[in-house]
Amino acid sequence: MTFPTSISAAQFSALAVSRDAVPGSITEANLKTNFATAADFVEIKNIRDMPSFGTPANIVKVPVYGQAQTQSIGAQSDAPDLELTVNYIPSEWAKVDASFATTGTLGDAVADGVSKVFQFALLPAKPPALTTAATAGVGGTVAAPVPNALIYFVGKVESLLVNPSRDDASTATVALSIQSDFYGPYTVTATS
């Protein structure tokens, strides 16, 4: 199965951060390689509220001498603010005080200053895995395919703000910065 082909709710979506280094050249194949196996990335779980992913419009009105109305042009847009609200489970965000690439602990990724590749997966159903492997990954299997759309970007986990609560689950706000364009959407088609 390839991209979703009908209008439907995004019943399952996931955000993962790669433990591998940012590839030297940004191509679809290189980005997918950062998520080829489960050891390559960590899923940010328990996301309660997901931001919008993509480049926002920045239309600028330009006056033109001698015309009755202005023209509009697309200008460089500001990167969107990516803030996730997660149900906060301290063990998932614990700091080991080592390299995130080594520990795979999300707490070690917070404010470490290292750029990482992020994968946002938009899916109508939960896949067998979030890997980009063509066998039982985000695309499912040939027998049970899962339509998928994958968007990538390079960024950093800038901060974690914990919001304690007495009458609901404790939450945290995770702020991500963006150091690249958004790439995709790409898809993975199951081969077996």
Image (spheres, rainbow, N blue to C red):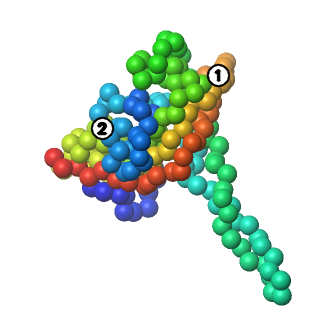
Front position in the image: 147 or 22: 22
Locate residue 29 relative to residue 104 in the image: left or right: left
Residue at 74%, 77% (x, y): give it: 71
Indicate whether 5 appears above or below 116.
Answer: below
Closer to the N terminus: mark 1 or mark 2?
2
Residue at 42%, 23% (x, y): give it: 101
Locate residue 131 relative to residue 151 in the image: left or right: left
Evaluate whether residue 188 shows in this view: yes
Q: At numbered mark 1, what does the secondary structure look like: helix, strand or loop?
A: strand
Say which amino acid is labelled 2. Answer: Ala
Disc ID at residue 36: 2
For residue 177, which quarter of the picture?
top right
Residue at 38%, 50% (x, y): give it: 27
Front position in the image: 99 or 190: 99
Locate residue 130 relative to residue 69 in the image: left or right: left
Front position in the image: 61 or 167: 61
Disc ID at residue 184: none
Mark in front: 1 vs 2: 2
**Separation (CA) of disc 1 from disc 2:** 31 Å
Dot 1 and dot 2 residues touching (CB under 8 Å):
no
Please state the horizontal and vertical placement of residue 119, each as a whole percent of the image: 44, 42
Please state the horizontal and vertical placement of residue 107, each as a whole percent of the image: 53, 20
Indicate whether 60 appears above or below 162.
Answer: below
Say which amino acid is labelled 1. Answer: Val
Q: At numbered mark 2, what does the secondary structure look like: helix, strand or loop?
A: loop
Disc ID at residue 162: 1
Indicate whether 183 appears above or below 86.
Answer: below
Evaluate whether residue 15 shows in this view: no
Residue lying furthest front: 24
The quarter of the rendered structure image containing the N terminus is bottom left
